[in-house]
């Protein structure tokens, strides 16, 4: 997806960034307004999404991606776990408080593919060995994946050995995801688990952790 910043508005209490996000070589897109506010030691981000054009295909996911330092390799969260969970594949998950390393969050499929999502998360923390790092809270919940490679790296890989750690941890914070389906051995995604391009608003709250 290509990102274009259309306007940046700085006010006394907030920063507003208006963008258009779109796949290449198409007139389709998403207008996204990012509204940043700071209060009480926290940074609050509200994203408002509006489709541009007639989307005939669903979105794979709708959310944010950011990079954090590679040292923040310890993850704790309150949400579904301990294993991965997706909209149409979460019967084995239960709500609770869990901890893992970024490496342990990955599901090592023989053929690399989307994996490792944790769903319906109230909050998560990424920390280094001293306990310093970043806390992220959903409003009320988010999904997240944390990997040492990008989604593009994952899509390009043909064997697990192709996935080589970068100098960052890549964190996806998702408002929603398209279901997995079972097209390799059965039907595709059922209608209830499709993710259409539609107006949406979601919020995440960031706080630093001193350790």
Image (cartoon, rainbow, N blue to C red):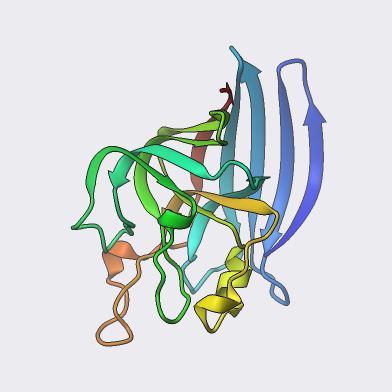
Closest to the observer, 25 or 108: 108
Question: Which residue ends up furthest to the front in the rendered image?
Answer: 129
The image shows residue 126 at horizontal and vertical percentages of 52, 38
Q: How many marks?
A: 0
Closest to the observer, 149 or 2: 149
Relative to 179, say whether 175 is above or below: above
Residue 72 placement: quadrant: top right
Relative to 170, say whether 113 is above or below: below
The quarter of the image holding the N terminus is bottom right
The image shows residue 151 at horizontal and vertical percentages of 58, 65
Taking the spot 27% from the left edge, 71% from the top edge, the residue there is 190
The quarter of the image holding the C terminus is top right
The image shows residue 81 at horizontal and vertical percentages of 29, 48
Question: Which residue ends up furthest to the left in the rendered image?
Answer: 91
Q: Is residue 211 left or right of residue 77?
A: right
The image shows residue 67 at horizontal and vertical percentages of 66, 48
Relative to 104, say whether 7 is above or below: above
Question: Which residue ends up furthest to the top in the rendered image?
Answer: 40
Residue 96 placement: quadrant: top left
Taking the spot 32% from the left edge, 83% from the top edge, the residue there is 183
Taking the spot 53% from the left edge, 28% from the top edge, the residue there is 131
């Amino acid at each position: 997806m290509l990102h274009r910043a259309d306007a940046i508005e700085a006010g006394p209490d907030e920063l507003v960034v208006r963008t258009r996000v779109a796949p290449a070589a198409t007139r389709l897109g998403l207008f996204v307004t990012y509204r940043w506010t700071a209060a009480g030691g926290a940074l609050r981000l509200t994203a408002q999404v509006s489709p541009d054009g007639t989307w005939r295909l669903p979105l794979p996911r709708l959310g944010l991606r950011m990079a954090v330092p590679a040292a923040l390799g310890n993850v704790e969260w309150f949400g579904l776990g301990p294993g991965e969970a997706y909209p149409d594949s979460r019967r084995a998950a239960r709500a609770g408080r869990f901890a893992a390393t970024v490496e342990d969050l990955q599901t090592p499929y023989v053929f690399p593919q989307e994996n490792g999502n944790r769903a319906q998360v109230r909050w998560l923390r990424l920390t280094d060995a001293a306990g310093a790092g970043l806390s992220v809270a959903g409003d009320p919940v988010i999904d997240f994946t944390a990997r040492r490679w990008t989604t593009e790296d994952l899509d390009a890989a043909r064997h697990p050995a192709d996935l080589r750690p970068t100098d960052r941890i890549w964190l996806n914070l998702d408002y929603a995801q398209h279901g997995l389906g079972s097209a390799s051995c059965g039907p595709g995604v059922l209608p209830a688990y499709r993710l259409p391009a539609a107006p949406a608003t979601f919020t995440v709250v960031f706080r630093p952790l001193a350790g």
